Amino acid sequence: MHSVSLVTIGTVDAWAAGAVGDDAGRPLVHAAVRCVARWGIRKTSLDDIAREAGVSRATVYRVFPGGKDRVVEALVQHQAGRLFHEWNAELEAAATLEDLLVVGVGAALRLPLDDELTRVVLTHEPELVLPHFAFDRLDRVFDTADALCRPHLARFLPDDDIRAAAELLTRVVVSFGLRSAPWLDPHDPASVRHLVRTYLLPAIAPASAARPSQEHE
């Protein structure tokens, strides 16, 4: 059985196992990130990505058969994977489900505020990103969330409950990430813990795991 860190990092290395189909796609995802950070989504062409990665146009079109739309999807999955990679140590150190959710949900809610690429894209080109969080296209987002959350949630939840929990957490993070609430401050751990303890933990936790840790009482 793989350790939590190996499963998570392996998923990140594969960019959530959906954005690209093989190892050749990883440099293209990195190249796409650099191009979008430089020029934005609309002004970045597949030719730009090919030049940045030093590959042929044919390679780019093979990896991103859906064109620009597929590139955006890859970027969404890349950002999710990178977030879990950066916070992996803190997620592994969480002693309770409540602490795990505070770390993970807090980090996800801060991404649109603190990450320059995410902030710029959502501010200036939201119409190119938001469709990926709507209707049946959310299925890929849920698949990514399941893959990334599962190794951590498996420490506290039965296997059959993990998919639903990952979906619920994703819906909450997307909602608050795209439309902030005056009573929730992602940079305030106490505010994030209030969200987790009051609303999220009771919704997804077994009764034994839902008990708050004493140190935060």
Image: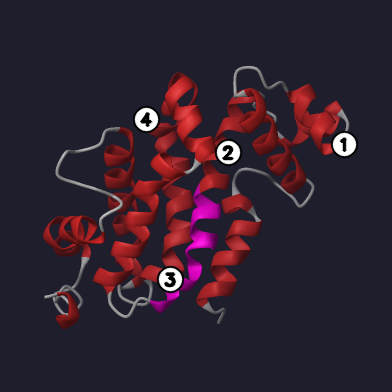
CA distance for labels 3 and 1: 36 Å
* Residue found at x 61% / y 43%: 19
Residue position for label 3: 90
The mark nearer the N terminus, 3 or 1, is 1
Residue position for label 4: 134
Disc 1 marks which amino acid? Gly
* Residue 67 at x, y percent in the picture: 67, 24
Residue position for label 1: 54
- Callout 1 secondary element: loop
* Residue 82 at x, y percent in the picture: 55, 53
Please state, as top left, top right, bottom left or bottom right, where the C terminus lies in the image: bottom left
Q: Which one is in front, 31 or 25?
A: 31
- Callout 4 secondary element: loop
CA distance for labels 1 and 4: 34 Å
Task: Look at the image and give the residue range highlighted in magenta.
Answer: 80-93
Query: Label 2 near label 4: C-beta < 8 Å?
Result: no
Disc 3 marks which amino acid? Glu
Is any atom of residue 163 visible in this view? no
- Give the quadrant of residue 60: top right
Disc 4 marks which amino acid? Ala
